[in-house]
Amino acid sequence: MNREAARGVSRSRPKMGEGGEEGRQQKSWRSVRTEKEEEQITQAFVVTLSLSSRVETAGLGKPQLETQKMMDGDKPWVLISEVGENGYLEEVIDIIKQHFNIICHRDFLKNPQLHGPKIQALFVWHTCPDPEPSLLSLLPSLKVVANGGVGVNHLDVSYITSLGVKVTNTPSVVSDATADMAMALLLASARRVVRGHQIAVDVQTTHLPLTLMGIDVTGSTLGIIGMGDVGYKIAQRCKGFDMKILYHNRNRRSDEDEQALGATYCENMDDLLKASDFVILGVTLTPETTGLISHRELSLMKPTATLVNVSRGLVVDQDAVVKALQSGTIHAAALDVTYPELLPRDHPLLGLPNVLISPHMGINTYSTIRRMVQTMVQSAVAAISGHPVPNEVKPR
Ligand SMILES: O=C(O)C(=O)CO
């Protein structure tokens, strides 16, 4: 699959900087405000932050609208893209506010000519549309695009850096949470936790589901494809489950790493696919890894095997996964990432009983998000002040 196709995930959503009726209609996933609230936020340099529906989901209160005047002349301005309909958590906003004046994308669009020239930093997430040249051209003072997350496949790094703008990401701080999520998916899929929950809460249920069988995790064979930081941490966790650990990676890890994990390197990915009870994908999405797992690879897997993906949806050929699950070529799939995200409600994956899907929430823990934003702020401040930039991403 080519790069354009790989970028198809963000294409399904409005691009940053896109105006027009179509763009506005597509933005219906963003939160809706009353007219009075709209009036409040049209003042120049007013920051409107809609608090996260995640906060509500977490039982911490309803999302609210907080409108603040922040005209601290000493602080540079950051344009923050909204994270889908979720907005930013309040405490995360507080971290940013210590160093920046903030304008959110929605308010920026109301008067880009006014706001654009003073913006020096742009904060984006993998859930956000790619900042298009049309947006970047409105930001003549931009010094840095700071991405929340390690994967930058949604950004055209070559183009952005060609403008003299630095790109940064947040490696390592995401690894533990993402590895935990891989374990959550693996365990929940193997032991059919979601189905069990459905049965337990079903008012019709009168008997314990003694025929609802899972598969063993302890003592099984795990194959990790992509042994970077996340893969390494998954292996650490699986060692505690007495799993036999195989891995495939561009570069073989050191002897010390292999010994510490009790992991065996498979130079040939096919060997790993044939031998594993669980295959976990932890690779970065690049042109080389796009469509890495397709019909042939799935056909090599055991019919009892489970595919777990915490990297990017486009690393697998999703149609091939649907077929493999329907035909029993593999036993199950547990996916934190898909394409697009979210899947259309009529997507065949959503109707399969042997699929567990979560909506790309690998990094969603409070401390992880906090550390990610701290990292973004640190990198952006360095870029703006002309210091060496931590976590700089160079074009490939
Ligand atoms: O770190 C990343 O790239 C993520 O996708 C976070 O979930």
Image: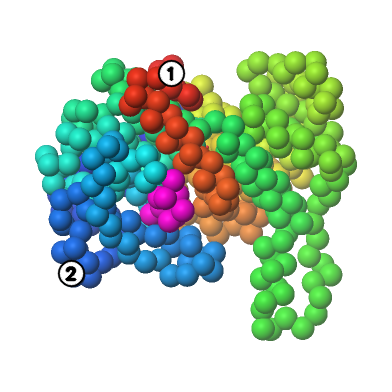
User: Which quadrant holds residue 384?
Assistant: top left
Q: Is residue 54 left or right of residue 230?
A: left
Q: Is residue 126 above or below residue 358?
A: above
Q: How is the image coloured?
A: rainbow
- At horizontal 71% and vertical 37% (from top left) the residue drawn is 234
* Residue 245 visible in the picture: yes
**Residue 12 is at least partly visible in this image:** no
Helix, strand or loop at label 1? It is loop
**Quadrant of the image occupied by residue 11:** top left
Would you say the magenta stretch is mainly helix, strand or loop?
A: helix
Question: Dot 2 corresponds to which residue?
Answer: 35
Q: Amino acid at mark 1?
A: Pro
Q: Is residue 94 magenta?
A: yes
Q: The magenta stretch spans which residues?
A: 86-95
How crowded pointer 1 is (Cα within 10 Å; few <14, some 14-19, many 20+) is rated as few
From the top left corner, tell me how far across and down residue 103 is, in percent. 27, 47
Is residue 326 positioned above or below 278 on the image? Answer: below
List x then y, in percent, for residue 306. Answer: 71, 44
Q: Picture coordinates of residue 142 (x, y %)?
A: 26, 29
Q: Amino acid at mark 2?
A: Glu
Task: Please state which of residues 77 and 204 is positioned toward the viewer in this rendering.
Answer: 77
Please check the rendered image and state whether residue 230 is part of the magenta-colored stretch, yes or no. no
Q: Quadrant of the N terminus?
A: top left
Q: Which residue is mark 1?
A: 388
Disc 2 CB within 8 Å of nearest ligand 1 atom: no
Residue 240 quadrant: top right
Spatial CA distance of label 2 from label 1 is 45 Å
Numbered disc 2: secondary structure: helix
Residue name at image x 50 percent, y 29 percent: 285
Q: Is residue 138 left or right of residue 130?
A: left
Question: Residue 296 versus residue 265: which sits nearer the camera?
Answer: 265
Which residue is pictured at 59% across the width and 32% down the height? 172
